[in-house]
Image (cartoon, rainbow, N blue to C red):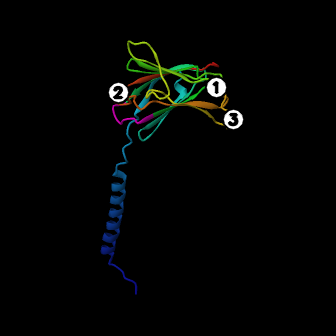
Amino acid sequence: MPFHLPHNQRFRATSGALAFALLTLLVAGCETTPKVPPPAITLASSTEPDGIHITQSGSNVLIVVQSARGIGNAWFEVAKKPPVREVRLRLHLRGLEEFRFSQGGSELRVSVPSQPGQPVHESVQRAGQFAQALAPADPLWIPVQIVQADGAVKAIPLQSGWFELTLPALIPFGDGNDFRLSWVDYFR
């Protein structure tokens, strides 16, 4: 014989279960979603605003530049927190006649020759000083990789690749140290 509650107890049991279900939904809806930290680096302005994309994974930032004109610059704002550990750049250009990173009155310059077998030229110019050449062992040296997207030969002019640069760890990316990037493609 099935167990039956009297009508008034059945209503209390049903309304109690309904109240419990509503309370559960309400509490679940009020749970806070994990806070997403603000981006560490944001684009302030650029001559190619639609061609600059910034992604962040933890304390690593990737800035992708796609410059249809082959010449341009961009200004970036750096948040006080969270700190940035690594900044990589992907410059979708056919050649890299000149790249400049400027911050706090100092500037790093990179030039990748268009002729094969020639060394990359890099220099630093600190505020109020003349430019000084950098050697690959210098802590301010910016490693440059040529990446071909379709597996083609890494030859300049690039047909479907990019230049990937990793900015030196000595550069302070925190405490509002804003910076500027500029680039010039040989084949603009």
Decide if residue 5 is on the left or right side of residue 70.
left
User: In percent of the image, x 33 and y 55: which residue is there?
Assistant: 27
Which residue is label 1 attached to? 117
Q: Classify residue 95 as left or right of residue 167.
A: right
Task: Using the numbered discs, state the Cα–Cα distance from disc 3 to disc 2 in whole angstroms.
Answer: 40 Å
- Viewer-side residue, 22 vs 115: 115
Q: Are marks 3 and 2 in contact (CB under 8 Å)?
A: no
Reading the chain from its start, which is encountered first: label 2 or label 1? 1
Residue 176 — which label? 2
Which of discs 1 and 3 lies nearer the camera? The answer is 1
Comes first in the chain, label 3 or label 2: 3
- Tell me the kind of residue under disc 2: Gly
Q: Residue at x 44, y 26 (%)?
A: 140
Instruction: Give x and y (percent) for residue 54.
Output: 48, 33
In the image, 22 versus 163, the foreground residue is: 163
Q: Which residue, given by chain and number where applicable, does mark 3 sit on?
A: 152
Label 3: element kind:
loop
Dot 3: within a 10 Å radius of its alpha carbon, few (fewer than 14), some, or many (20 or more) residues?
A: few
